[in-house]
Image: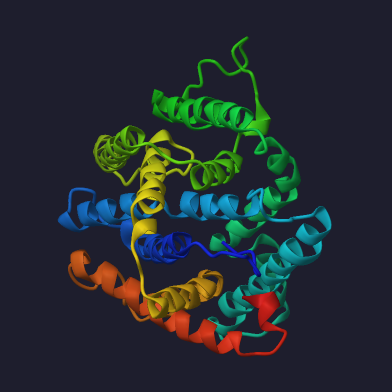
Amino acid sequence: MKTITNTKKRLTYLDLLRIISIFFMIGIHVVGITWYTTPVSSFSWQVMNIYDSIFRICVPIFVMISGSLFLDQNKNITINKLFTKNILRIFIALLFWSLIYGIFHCIILSRTLTIDTIILTLKEFVRGHYHLWFIPMLIGLYIITPILRKLCENKKIEEYFLILGIIFNFGWITIQRLIPYSIHILDGTIFDFNISLILGYSTYFVLGHYLNTYPISRNKEITSYILGIVGLLFTILGTVIISFQKGEPTNLYDNMLLNTFLASLAFFILFKNRISKVNFSTKTISNITFISNLCFGIYLIHDFFITILTKYEITASLFSPLLSIPLIILLVFLISFIITYLISKIPIIHKYII
């Protein structure tokens, strides 16, 4: 999510993807407040499911954006620079905001300062607030970036890596998820290959570089859109079916499922092939860049305001979720944007906390 600074040429379509994805990420957390407690037979839950299914592409998109930037062969990214600049900055931000969230939830909201709340705050600091999981994952990708950059020097090897990732990462995890009662019939057998190298978010990371670097033909573009729509419909309808069968909210939202991968792929290609060709005015590009640069800070602090709104019962259930969800997302975004902007004006410190 954090961008590389001092790039020679900035890609506006990546900035737009980042901005839209931050809205989607806020949306996931807004919907998540009431999604699990709303009856699956209700209209409200169906609306929440559709919104949430659409929003789920945000994390894959964020990772693909990072991959397109950090694996760019035209950029000089050394191991020393990765650790002393990129990793150090987001690690400090992780520590800072993890502590602030711990203090906020354990002391400020409870209005109690005791040895017990201090100990609880420290525990929350070590565990990290739920949405901060993204940063350690991103640090892991940054750590292996020098290896992945070597892999991306060769298009054929990169394609081979992606094929393995699609099969053994997204494909295999999807099969496991859809087997009733989570019976992994091939685990512990001669077919349990355990190819750890291509598992996790590294496939998305490399995919971002591949899509940003190489042209996508018209036929492949159309195919990706069709598969993306199929993936999205599978997420929506599959979640409905499974939830009705179990009688409680159960989703197919996982970032590593094939349906999420297909929807994310199509969305990225749409922006790469179509939105990138839009001739934005200089002022518009400047505004897009300005908002994009604040997205990391918005990600870090937005949950404070979701928590505060929830405390006053301003949730997706306040009125029809068709309107309440986008309105709350917009409200949280605007507040987070203003606060992040103000923090960005703090000399030196802002570089390490947003």
Taking the image as shown, residue 301 lies to the left or right of residue 333, namely: right
Residue that protrudes farthest toward the right in the picture: 80
What residue sits 16% from the left and 55% below the top? 43
Is residue 311 among what the camera can see? no
Indicate the quadrant where residue 181 lies: top left
**Image height of 263 relative to 111, above or below:** above
Q: Quadrant of the image for the C terminus?
A: bottom right
Q: Position of residue 226 (x, y in %)?
A: 27, 36
In front: 264, or 272? 272
Taking the image as shown, residue 15 lies to the left or right of residue 267, namely: right
Q: Quadrant of the image for the N terminus?
A: bottom right
Residue that protrudes farthest toward the top in the picture: 190
Q: Position of residue 136 (x, y in %)?
A: 67, 56
Colouring scheme applied when the structure was drawn: rainbow
**Image height of 342 relative to 142, above or below:** below
In front: 19, or 211? 211
Indicate the quadrant where residue 323 lies: bottom left
What residue sits 65% from the left and 25% below the top? 195
Is residue 52 among what the camera can see? yes
Taking the image as shown, residue 65 lies to the left or right of residue 193, namely: left
**Image height of 157 relative to 99, above or below:** above
Q: Position of residue 35 (x, y in %)?
A: 32, 57
Q: Position of residue 82 (x, y in %)?
A: 76, 58
Taking the image as shown, residue 240 lies to the left or right of residue 59, namely: left
Indicate the quadrant where residue 251 lies: top left
How many numbered marks does the figure carry?
0
